[in-house]
Image (cartoon, rainbow, N blue to C red):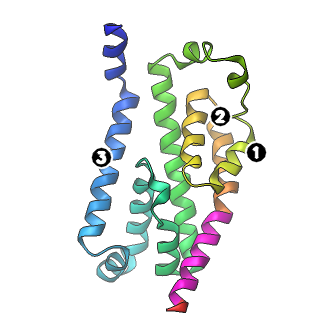
């Protein structure tokens, strides 16, 4: 038991995840400390979309990051087209990072062996099916679960990325349009 715990604590995947969460929290605190996303745009001008992209990307790595309304903020700050593009790219990059961290962690923890111990009905759940990987983007908190599950189960990164691209596009457009509409309504 102790050796299993010790190997788990030495997992590069685990520490990559901890580092990603730490960086994400630091970025969110920084954005809040300077006055929020609107202050980023005002202070950094032409660099603001790049900073918004980076902030959104690392913010998505925090557990619960989907609950932070980055997509709406991007639409409010940059309009529908640019706001949707920033959000879509951020979701693509964060999905890839979550996938890679989960893939590495699964290797470190010999997840394949542990999955064989699950009940048969649970092993048959189609976490690698494109319908799940696309539809997961439409519900808060499910996209990151799909990314991690895909990485842990060895789904190809190409499949995850095209499913993420298809699933995240309508959400990015919808949230950016909502954000842009809120600005007009004020």
Q: Is residue 139 left or right of residue 95?
A: right
- Residue 74 image position (x, y, % from top left): 49, 73
Q: Secondary structure at mark 1?
A: helix
Q: Residues within 10 Å of mark 2 (few under 14, many from 20)?
A: few
| Front label number (2 vs 1) | 1
- Residue 153 image position (x, y, % from top left): 61, 27
> Image quarter for residue 180?
bottom right
Q: What secondary structure is the stretch in magenta mostly built from?
A: helix
Which residue is located at x 33 percent, y 73 percent? 36
Vertical arrangement, residue 7 with respect to residue 28, above or below: above
Q: Mark 3 to mark 1: distance in Å? A: 32 Å
Tag 2 or tag 3, which sits nearer the N-term? 3
Considering depth in this image, is 162 or 46 the residue closer to the camera?
162
| Front label number (3 vs 2) | 3
Q: Is residue 83 left or right of residue 32?
A: right
> Image quarter for residue 53?
bottom left
Q: Secondary structure at mark 2?
A: loop
Q: Mark 3 to mark 2: distance in Å? A: 27 Å
- Residue 152 image position (x, y, % from top left): 56, 29
Vertical arrangement, residue 78 with respect to residue 124, above or below: below
The single residue placed furthest to the left in the displayed view is: 33
Q: Residues within 10 Å of mark 3 (few under 14, many from 20)?
A: some
Magenta highlight range: 170-183
Q: Which mark is residue 22?
A: 3
Q: Which residue is mark 1?
A: 131
Q: Is residue 122 left or right of residue 37?
A: right
Considering depth in this image, is 139 or 42 the residue closer to the camera?
139
> Image quarter for residue 20?
top left
Q: Quadrant of the N terminus?
A: top left
Q: Which residue is mark 2?
A: 156
Residue 81 seen by the camera: no
């Amino acid at each position: 038991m102790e050796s299993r715990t010790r190997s788990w604590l030495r997992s590069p995947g685990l520490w990559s995840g901890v580092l990603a969460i730490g960086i994400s929290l630091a970025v969110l605190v920084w954005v809040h400390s300077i006055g929020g996303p609107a202050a980023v745009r005002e202070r950094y001008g032409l660099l603001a979309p790049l900073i918004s992209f980076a902030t959104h990307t690392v913010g998505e790595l925090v557990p619960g990051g989907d609950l932070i309304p980055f997509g709406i903020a991007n639409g409010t700050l940059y309009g529908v087209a640019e706001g949707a593009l920033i959000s879509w790219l951020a979701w693509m990059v964060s999905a890839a990072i979550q996938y890679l961290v989960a893939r590495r962690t699964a290797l470190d923890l010999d997840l394949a062996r542990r999955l064989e111990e699950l009940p048969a009905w649970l092993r048959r759940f189609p976490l690698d099916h494109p319908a799940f990987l696309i539809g997961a983007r439409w519900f808060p908190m499910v996209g990151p679960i799909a990314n991690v599950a895909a990485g842990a189960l060895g789904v190809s990164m190409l499949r995850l990325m095209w499913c993420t691209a298809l699933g995240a596009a309508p959400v990015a457009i919808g949230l950016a349009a909502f954000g842009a509409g809120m600005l007009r309504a004020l």
